[in-house]
Image (cartoon, grey):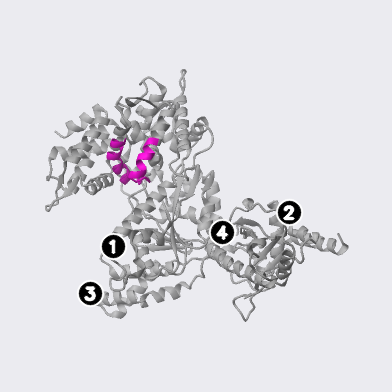
Amino acid sequence: MSLITKIRTTLFRWQQKWLYGLIRTQIIGPDARDFNLDKDKPVIYAMLYPSHAEQLVIDREASNLGWTSPQQERASGRLPGKPYFAIYRRASMYRKQGTPVVASQLVKQCQWLMENDERDIQIVPVRVFWGRAPAKEGSFLRIWLQSTGAIGGRLAKLMAIVLNGRNTFVHFSRPLSLKEMADGVRSPDMLARKVSRVLRVHNRQVSAAVLGPDLSHRRTLVHQIPNRPLVLKAIEEEAAEKGISKAKAQQRALKYADEIASNISYTNVRFLDVVLTWVWNKIYDGIALHNMENLKEVIKDNEIIYVPCHRSHIDYLLLSYVLYHHGLQLPQIAAGINLNMPVVGPILRRGGAFFMRRTFRGNKLYAAVFDEYLHSVFSGGYATEYFVEGGRSRTGRTLNPRAGMLAMTLRSYLRDSRKPILFMPVYTGYEKVFEANSYLGELRGKKKKKESLFGVIGTLRSLKRSFGKVNVTFGEPIYFTEFLDQQRPGWREEDYSACEYRPDWAPVVVDQLAKEVVTGINNAASVNPVNLIALSILSAPRQAMEEQQLISQMEAYRDLLAENPYSDLTALPEGSGAEWLQYGEKLDVVSRSRHPLGDLIQTTDRQAVTLTYYRNNVLHLLALPSLLACLFVNNQRYTLAQVKEKVAHLYPYLKAELFLRWDQNALLAETERWLEALTRRGYLLSGEQGYHATPASSNEFAMLQGLSDNVMQTLQRYFLTLSILSRKGSGVLSAQALEEQSTLLAQRISLLYGINAPEFFDKTLFRTLIQQLISDQHLARQDDDTLAFTDGLQALTGDLEEILDGALKQSILRSLV
């Protein structure tokens, strides 16, 4: 190594050390550890603009990843020029956009490559985003005063490093082979131009994923909305119907737009980042992410709409936090107007929330303004987030979807489908939900408390408790264009202007989309120790078990799901049953009673009801094997054909309630797979006469019985409703009357038998059952709105009578006398 090279390297390292005294970096984008760079081939790094500071960062981060240091690569001299090149010349004060360039050294390196067919160069695209945080993370005042601007020359870069360097993101993209790109290219100049062009396209994709589109000034957007054609028409109708002037109606539309629109501020985002980092570290033991790499891959070429399950107010804060820390664009989040309260509302609005009223009924002008705002968000290319369930789930189940936001998304897409949209289902699994106590009160009949600032302050007391870990799983994307092509071939060729983008076929398509979304959420469900405790102990008499029995049952559930996962995304907890039980005691989800013959694990009434929430989170994962177990726990014997027949009869109602993933064709194969699994583990026995349960005295039978209890109460609810119908007769009850009588009888039965599960008498579940019976043509609405039933209903009732326990069955029938 020459003296000049040594001096240059020493100076480079000194500068690097000084720089890293000012900054803190975080790697974002694809997992760079999986790039598998070939150490025998030289590596060059493609930057956006020439920057010595960025070269210092790239060298350090590459070395930390175990790659060859770019500075060492340069010193080795095996490749002409530097191991860095830029694809743009930096913008000046007279030019806002950078100028595309083809780096001269890239041309030289292309020439070096083409001189020998054995050579190759690995190109790693890299972006360094100088962050938005102040030098000191705890300086909240500095965060609020901090403002960011476009980074131009060296002085601006230095200011960005000094002010924002503690929040620096480094994005490495997957390497490109220069040799592969040279295929069919005749000259080094042409190859260098091709590489630069490909990298510029790639850079736009990275910028869209990390930063999103440029944010329009909120005031400009708000004032534009009342002047859009569809809103102008609604303004004229409002003026005519209400007898007011057009100017007053327009002012009303402007007020609505201002009430709705978000005002995202990255200074506010950084403030929330500091606060939430402190909160998560205070209350959670960690956040586990699943399928994040797939999200980073599909987001490149699509506008994304996140559609998470809604378990807690923490959901949207948590998702934005995760996306921010992985360098992805923050979404615009649909939030209920009830959250637009003093102090909290402005913070959420500056964090990306836009607010919507609970109902648009009777207010066409508001609906038009909201539609137009949403269209501006979608057509502008912003990431978006909304909850298809509407409100938070109080029972832990995925709720029936409300299709309003999906319908508005469809209307926007019919107006402008140039930017492809994908829906990303997101499952959030908590070990202890923040609002558990308030949910418990509401399920016991207390009135839901209205959100208020004092309520938010009151929750600060919860920061003293541990809420365990959180699992966040990104599901499989639903591509909107492909979905519409399947549901409505030729939809692009239709003219929707006359119907204001509300075609007759929209409701059916939107309902199907809503079902796919919630099914996609359930497909992404993960399992945690509290879920396993709930599945096990709630099936025991009096919700109490011997310690070793509980441990064995939890591990048996884990093993069943490991051998037969519900989907490719199903995540299971690590560790043993004993460790999970110890963890559950720490979270106060169960209690221990000491006894000389062996400790007993039991639940208080409060713990039992709370645990139903966590059982319901994952009930769908075991719904099919639980249904199979129900067939055999009363010592029935069935052939394979009989099993398939009974499962086919009952499955549609479980599918409608739990949003299960299999259609009738896939169901038969899945049934056989689970029968084999239950037989392999000794829970069922098979012979020439078919399948039957193991002896009732065996441990395997105890497990089978516990498994059956997970859906037995659901089947009891079905029997209860069908029994009311049968007793009252065909053409007597309306759907509403049947729903009300079923709810009242379920409440009575739950009191008599000590059933702690609130969903046993949940009116919406009875409504879902009735709707599915109508859909399957077992029930039919008559002209007077009463329900007539067919012979198929009696067959379904007979199947349930055969499965259910005799005592509870007789109690239901006696209550109908």
Residue farthest toward the top in the current orientation of the protein: 597
Residues in magenta? 644-672
Q: Is residue 230 magenta?
A: no
**In 3D space, how far apart are the residues under numbered discs 2 and 1 (Cα atoms)?**
59 Å
Q: Earlier in the sequence, mark 4 or mark 2?
A: 2
Whole-percent x, y for residue 654 in the image? 31, 42
Label 4 vs label 1: CA separation? 39 Å
Does dot 1 land on a helix, a strand or a loop? loop
Which mark is drawn over residue 40?
Answer: 2
In this figure, which residue is indicated by the disc labeled 1? 505
Q: Amino acid at mark 1?
A: Trp
Q: Which residue is mark 3?
A: 241
Kind of residue sitting beneath label 3: Glu
* Residue drawn at the location 30% of the way across and 35% of the way down: 713
Secondary structure under badge 3?
A: helix
The verdict on residue 665 being magenta is yes
Mark 2 touches mark 1? (CB < 8 Å): no
Q: Earlier in the sequence, mark 1 or mark 3?
A: 3
Mark 4, residue position: 327
Specify few, some or many for label 3: CA neighbours under 10 Å numbering under 14, 14-19, or 20 or more: few
Which amino acid, mark 2? Asp
Q: Nearer the viewer, mark 3 or mark 4?
A: 4
